[in-house]
Amino acid sequence: MKNYMFFWLCAIGLFAQPVLGQLVVTSVSFEDVAERYNTQSMEGDAMKWIQTFQVHLDGLRQSKTGMDMLMVTHDQSHFGKTKLYQWDPMFGAWKKAEYANFKVEYNGADPYYSFTIFKSGVYGVFSPIANRKPSILDIPEGLKVEQLSLVDQDLKVVLRYDYALAKNQIKIPIDFPTATMQINAKWLDKKGKVFEANNIALALMDPLTQKDLDEGRWMLSFDPKTLTTASLTAKK
Amino acid sequence: MRTLMLLALLSCTLKVAAQNAAYLLAKNLSGLRSIELSFQSNEVELDESSMYALYGAVNELYAAKRVVLCHNGKVFEPSKDDLGLHRKQWLMDFFRQENIVLFTENVFPMVPTNMNAPVVLYYEPYTDNTRFVQVKDTTYFADALGWELSHSSDMLTEVGNTAKGIIAKQDWGLYATTQSMTGEFVQLKMVFRMEHPDRSTLSKPVTIKMVSREGKAKDALELYIFNPLQQKWCQYGSGMVALKKKGDHYYYQSTVSHSGIFAIASPLTFPKYYEALVFDNNNTLLDVFIEDPRAQFNGQCGVQDNRRVVWVPKVPYPEDTFLKIHFRDVYGHEVHDEMSVAHLQKLQSPAFRFLIDLKNNLEEKSLTLNQEQ
């Protein structure tokens, strides 16, 4: 990680030496993304996280010419499909960074990203997931789900629904969720008792059956009696 | 009477065919060194003298050009107590454990008549001087393996300090992959080192010529550079490699200006090329690596984003090709497993049947799954 940061800062320094004083770049880890953001595009598609970072340019540097950046990357698997996105706090989703001229280039065998930044903000490099056919997540009647997020540490995907859900059906932009996808949820039962589930594997809450996968529709069990995991807590 | 004559004729034909096969095998094995192996009576393991003989030659066996196993039909044949099968399994496991590469196509169920032991191991030792033909006309640098460098005179010190040379085939395992960055497999023809101790780029391009030991290559050739971090081969520049002729010899010519490990390779043109294997729904596949002792398929298999389906190349020798499977269970434990491709294909698990369902009934989902390929 230290090496990576070193290369990254060197690359920025090379291209942005005259304005280094006005440029601040900080790395945003996947854990930060899982906690504060998501990995969904404005179109609603789920994307795989590769790298995220925050750029602060001072007012003078929000220029028309932009700031050229080179970023060393270790991800090889989705070249040609990766794109640069910028976080849109209004919509709570990632929108494509326009005019960024995002490219993957090589120095010998070492690949790096080359792009141009025009505005301050949180940026991320994402690639599309292959299984994008949406499926329906059913929540049992009588429960009020206040908060729901699905985090896949292996696939690097975060789906987040922070608002109280009006419906008991959620359209999930993944057709085959992984068995170890972690669920964080907060819900009220009929008596108004608040329950929280923290980082429970999907297959532990409700094992996906072949029928679920075929139909692309699965019901999530929120019954605390069936959930014996220690991380499930009830609050008075 | 006619039936009897026909039977006699048939038996004669079979006998002649068997003798002919034995003759061809003996001819094929002439000049190879041999080790006679016997098993302990009613035991799975080899006897003591065989083990001594085997370990005495083990260094030569590691780097042998070819290893051939001949056994008489009875020693490994299935019986009531399965002793033959267990003996075969034990011997194959032993070879694998000792990194002795024995391909399935080099196992013959017959022993030449001049041998007494039930199992005979033949091998062709590796010798340096037979590998390459030397290029006579050199410019600045040339070594006994038959390659030369052309560079401008002001680079003499720079090139002199560079570690350079052809990497012998038995050392290719150090670069434990035959996969390119794009995920496709390549067939390595030649691997060479051009490593400067301090620099990642050379001040000027250097032209390299190497004798092709295969003569005129049939496949299109490309130049790759090894990325040690990703353990994959990356196409170098335009990837152009010229194949030229000088006298009786063909040689590769290319230009490099970076420091690193390079390979001349041809992208594998096997039929596109995968078969899907599906794992159960309670685990998440993290990585699947494929290992082929022939160094044709060493690399990462494509795991689909649902982390259940893995695309395995259609390998010519599934018995010898192993998958190293790394997965996570629902309790967060990471598990490593290993099995041969042949074994995986034979598994009649619900997961395997799910694959059949997927292919036959779920055309739409099947297409979705194929997107990434």
Image: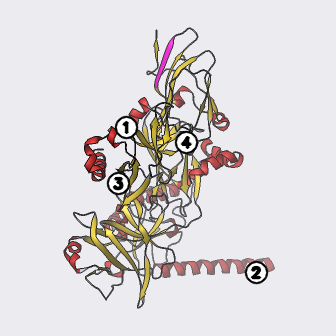
Q: Which mark is residue A223?
A: none
Within 10 Å of disc 4 (Cα), the crowding (few <14, some 14-19, many 20+) is many
Q: Secondary structure at mark 2?
A: helix
Which residue in the protein does label 2 denote? Answer: B5
Which residue in the protein does label 3 denote? Answer: B229
Look at the image and tell me whether residue B359 can be seen: yes
Indicate the position of residue B205 as horizontal and vertical percent values. 31, 73
Which amino acid type is shown beneath numbered disc 2? Met
Which residues make up the magenta segment? Answer: A191-198
Q: Is residue A193 magenta?
A: yes
Indicate the position of residue A18 as horizontal and vertical percent values. 26, 49
Prevailing secondary structure of the magenta residues: strand
Chain of residue at mark 2 = B
Which residue in the protein does label 1 denote? Answer: A29
Q: Mark 4 or mark 2, which has the lower sequence index?
A: 2
Q: Closer to the observer: label 4 or label 1?
A: 1
Which amino acid type is shown beneath numbered disc 3? Leu
The reply to whether dot 4 and dot 1 touch (C-beta < 8 Å) is: no
In the rendered view of the protein, which quadrant contains the N terminus of chain A?
top left
Q: State the residue lying farthest toward the left.
A: B157
Marks 4 and 1 sit apart, C-alpha to C-alpha, by: 23 Å
